Amino acid sequence: MVAKLSTTSKIVLLSGSLLFPALHLCSQETEAIVIRDVRHGVSAPLRSIKDTPTVVELEMDRGEAEEKVSKNEAQASHIPSYDPALQTGILASRLTQIRRIQGLGSSGRLVPDTNGAAGATQYMQWVNSEFAVYLKATGKLVLTGKGNKFWSGLTGPCENTTPNDGVILYDKLASRWVVSHYAGFGPYVQCVAVSTTTDATGSYNQYAFTLPTSYFTDYGKIGSWPDAYYLSINLLNQNDNFDSEGGLVCALNRANMLAGKSATAQCFTTTVQHMSLLPADLDGTTAPPAGSPNYLLDLGANALELWKFHVDWVTPSNSKLTGPTTIAVAKYSEACGGGVCIPQPPPGTLLDSLGDRLMHRLVYRNFGTHESIVATHSVNPPTNSSSAIRWYEIRSPGGTPTVYQQGTFSPDQQSRWMPSIAMDKNNDIAVGYSVSSNVSSNPVNPSIRYAGRLSTDALGTLETETNVVIGDGVQTVTDRWGDYSGMSVDPTDDCTFWYTNQYLPATGNSNWSTFIVSFKFPSCP
């Protein structure tokens, strides 16, 4: 029987190795739902594990696709007459490119969901169902494999099913890799692995958490914080055209997971008005002030909505998810009304903008003198383009959150979307993104670019963009184009940006490839 939880629900402790009845969550929880891992273990070194067959769960891709269809019904067709954050002037780029690496190619999945992170000596990339490890110094590929390899020997869906919505982070405070994805199709399982050393090809502490929901879990994102790994998930009603049913936000016991011990998670639900929350991911090695909650953001109406998640591992009744605090931003409309309208040269289809959500990652830094969060998403600009990059720097998230700067980057009629943002230790910012255009005078196949700004540049401005890869083809048949890309900062110098995204090496469908590039501002020591 399915239980409906109200806003007065008490703490529920769910534990053991048995799969408990799924809980039907539709209202916002005011007290934490506590769950234990249903399985945990330690893998052999990845470099010694052979790939094993998995059950490919095509329903996962279908669910995502139908979510997109429902968004298209609200697609906007108008061009806004004015964007108060639109950047007008532009400076020459002062970024220096360092490394160029050909990333993984199509594995037969519809989209790659490309992301990655830099570690001590390696860069690890994830493309939904596969991963690859490269040496930062040379770009040499040293290991690749199926994503379920991280959970080899754990048994259950984490080991036996093809991964979905995979995310890779590097925990800078612990110098460990963190990998997360979901598996199973009712009950729904979140799989998390934490490396035992700085070596991405070594062994991992493995965890499987059966999530407290009867809804389809989608678009999971994770962030690293001193007191927990924070996870956010969208909930979709698989019995009603995969309509949105709110979100699930969980704190995972980071200390126990680093130590390889059994771990608990504390979860809250949000209402349908609050989807696609992004948890803050700490960059740099300066921790937030003692006792700081993790910060989460989602999109509001011409606003960002800030949430605070305080977790208490000793007394879970003290754990709280509070918010949202509304942070007014420059007026905008979602790119394509949140749906499909990104143009390609013929014979390409229109592509999904994902303009209804903030894009991975939400990056936090403590500079000592101030705390900053940077975020980005796609908007509809007044420049005859279908999509532009809107980005923000929010300061004082723990006090009175303030928009320190914001900008809309749309220097021409080409469409820019699927951005990812980060900032280095000097408060310099870089954004990577996709670009495409069917303007007859300057058609552009879907390509990869980035742009950046020094902290001393005029507020709200990015410098001239740089081409990474110009696509050799367009996508046909489907409107899907990934779900996110990945910008990270090298933990060894805290200056070098690493970015990965997708492109098409030839016209076709589901024949994507990926690329990895690193670059920095020479003024960052």
Image (tube, rainbow, N blue to C red):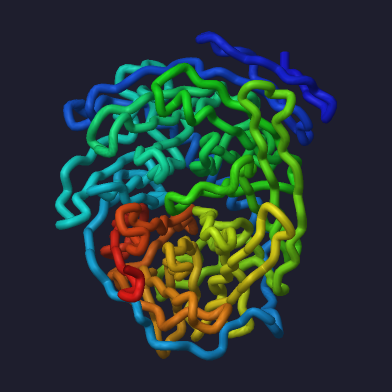
Give coordinates of residue 89: x percent, y percent: 52, 90
Q: Dividing the image into 4 quarters, which one contains the C terminus?
A: bottom left
Left or right of 76 in this view: 452: left
Q: How many marks?
A: 0
Q: Is residue 23 visible?
A: yes
The relative height of residue 46 versus residue 344 in the rendered view (above or below) is above
Q: Quadrant of residue 249?
A: top right
Q: Which of the pair 361/374 is nearer the observer? A: 374
Looking at the picture, how far across and down is residue 399, in whole percent?
72, 55
Q: Residue at x 57, y 79 (%)?
A: 459
Relative to the observer, which residue lies in front, 97 or 171?
171
Residue in the image at 51% along x and 26% along y: 189
Which quadrant is home to the N terminus? top right
Residue 398 x, y percent position in the rendering: 68, 52
Residue 168 appearing in the image: no
In the image, 105 versus 399, the foreground residue is 399
From the viewer's perspective, is 52 left or right of 259?
Answer: left
Which residue: 41% across, 83% down?
464
Compared to residue 190, the image places residue 97 above or below, namely below
Residue at the spot 71% in from the left edge and 47% down from the top edge: 274
Residue 364: image location, x then y, percent: 53, 54
Q: Quadrant of residue 499?
A: bottom left
